[in-house]
Image (cartoon, grey):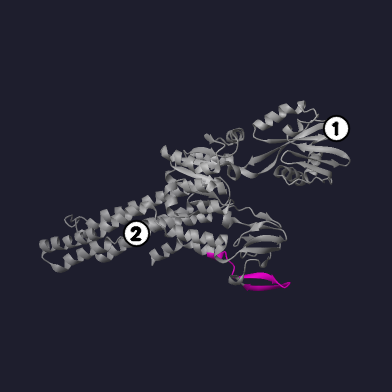
Amino acid sequence: MLESSTKGKTGGTKRKLFGLRPNTATIVEDGIEKEIPLSRVKVGDLVIVRPGESIPVDGIVSEGESSVDESMLTGEPIPVDKSPGDRIVGGTINGEGRLKFEAKKVGSDTALARIIRLVQEAQGSKPPIQALADKVASVFVPTVIGIAFLTFIIWWMIGGEFVPSMIRMVAVLVIACPCALGLATPTAIMAGTGKGAEKGMLFRNSEALETATKLDTVVLDKTGTITMGKPSVADVIVSDSSIKNEEELLRLGASVERGSEHPLGRAIVKEAEKRGLDLFEPEEFKAARGLGVQAKINGREVLVGKPAWLDKTDINLDSAMGQVLFLQEEGKTVMLVVVQRKLAGLIAVADMVKPESREALEELHRQNLKVIMLTGDNIQTAKAIASEVNIDEIFAEVLPEDKSAKIKKLQAEGKRIGMVGDGVNDAPALAQADVGMAIGTGTDVAIEAGDIILGSGSLTGVSKAINLSRATMRTVRQNLFWAFFYNIVLIPVAAGVLYPFEFLPDFLRQLHPILAALAMAVSSITVVSNSLLLYRAKID
């Protein structure tokens, strides 16, 4: 009873995950809201979620604004703001606003269903270390039966009495029940993968859990992994006294870029909106594809573009070239702003490093791991990012199809590689690595190729996953030790090796099968309880 009660706790994570799914959903049909069973929600249905309700399926917000608690998915406690066009995930909790969204994934296709499936598969899979326990168990059972019969024969020969000899034989059989040996690995795996799921780390199988403890090198993709994966404004520098401040320069530049679809232009517009600047409507807009744009803003001609484009005009750029070169060395893309044929200033745009990346990489170094960056970007940008976050080695300008070859080459040098990436181009490298870690906010292809999925999208999850793997395998080894220790010590006691020592208590000199059964149960409880301590383990 005690053992079953203790083992039941290790399945708690799956029950919590199942509990996140509501039983019903409110949909809009012919303009009328109606509540239907969750199983009847179809792709394309318009679903209503009220404040405080659990989101039933995955979808895209079409109306309303709210903050959503996504801690079950990412492990992060801070709610995420949602507005029209944003993706929401079934099982997360809506905050204070009312949301209407279009269902995109339902049933077994939802992110929550996939998480539950991964947890079940991981908890049911066997790591390589289990092979040792299985091999020992295959020898253990016939050996114990042989010891039991030998015990019976020896004591019958010594004492000539059948019943005491039979009692000793039964005590040996009972105390040597291999429950503890059988529970040692699976309970630790269940607890470890369950803890990981709670923290936003999904292990596709338990082999990944064990292999992660052996890594000595972590290879990181740059874009979307170390960096945000999208350009944003890094610097706004005014170089003309006729421009009052950087807000005015940014306002002019963003007003021109309103007509542009280029990612750099959109980044400038987004920064202006973020600062609350009112933009002008551009007139006579023209674009030089990939080089720059121009328009009239309040009657003034404004050009925004790359130095190479503007350098071909009669505009004097000499005063800015020193700053341009300096910013480019930092891996930034520089856009010059020209007003009425006169240089007004510059706006530098960069794929900014994630705020937590430096701290995450410092933690990997503390774990004695070498950190390598593998990117298709140019060497100048790669070096700038590497110096900012303290990368040990760089492989730059690597084509997508060559990334897996680089991983293979490192493995040939004897390195155990953990690859972290988020894009379609990272999928072959993730599959080639000893352990592939996919950023959960990345593409579905990368997620499918990864052995570990980091739901938070943060690099801090890499060190946490490795810490959890090490803690889990440490628990497995402890469990196997105690399982063997119990059997090595108590089988001889049950066989009667202490009988000649008259100063010892009678229950030790002749171990009764009832006490043997109790000792066997205690060994199992000890192993399972030790596994449950993983839920309290510090992995941050």
Q: Is residue 532 magenta?
A: no
Instruction: Choose top left, top right, bottom left or bottom right for residue 460.
Output: top right
Q: Which residue is mark 2?
A: 182
Q: Amino acid at mark 1?
A: Ser
Residue 175 visible (yes or no): yes
Distance of label 2 from label 1 (alpha carbons): 79 Å
As drawn, the residue found furthest toward the right would be 299
Up the image or down, 387 lies above or below 474; here it is above
How packed mark 2 is, by other alpha carbons closer than 10 Å (few <14, some 14-19, many 20 or more), is some
The structure residue drawn at horizontal position 63% and vertical position 73%, both measured from the top left corner, is: 36
Residue 354: % across, % down: 62, 43
- Viewer-side residue, 311 vs 158: 311
Left or right relative to 185: residue 397: right
Instruction: Choose top left, top right, bottom left or bottom right for residue 171.
Output: bottom left
Q: Secondary structure at mark 2?
A: helix
Q: Is residue 27 magenta?
A: yes
- Viewer-side residue, 168 vs 100: 100
Residues in magenta, as a range: 18-36
Quadrant of the rendering where the N terminus is positioned:
bottom left
On residue 242, which mark appears? 1
The structure residue drawn at horizontal position 56% and vertical position 49%, both measured from the top left corner, is: 424
On residue 228, which mark appears? none
- Viewer-side residue, 304 vs 182: 304
Q: Amino acid at mark 2?
A: Gly
The structure residue drawn at horizontal position 40% and vertical position 48%, both measured from the top left corner, is: 474
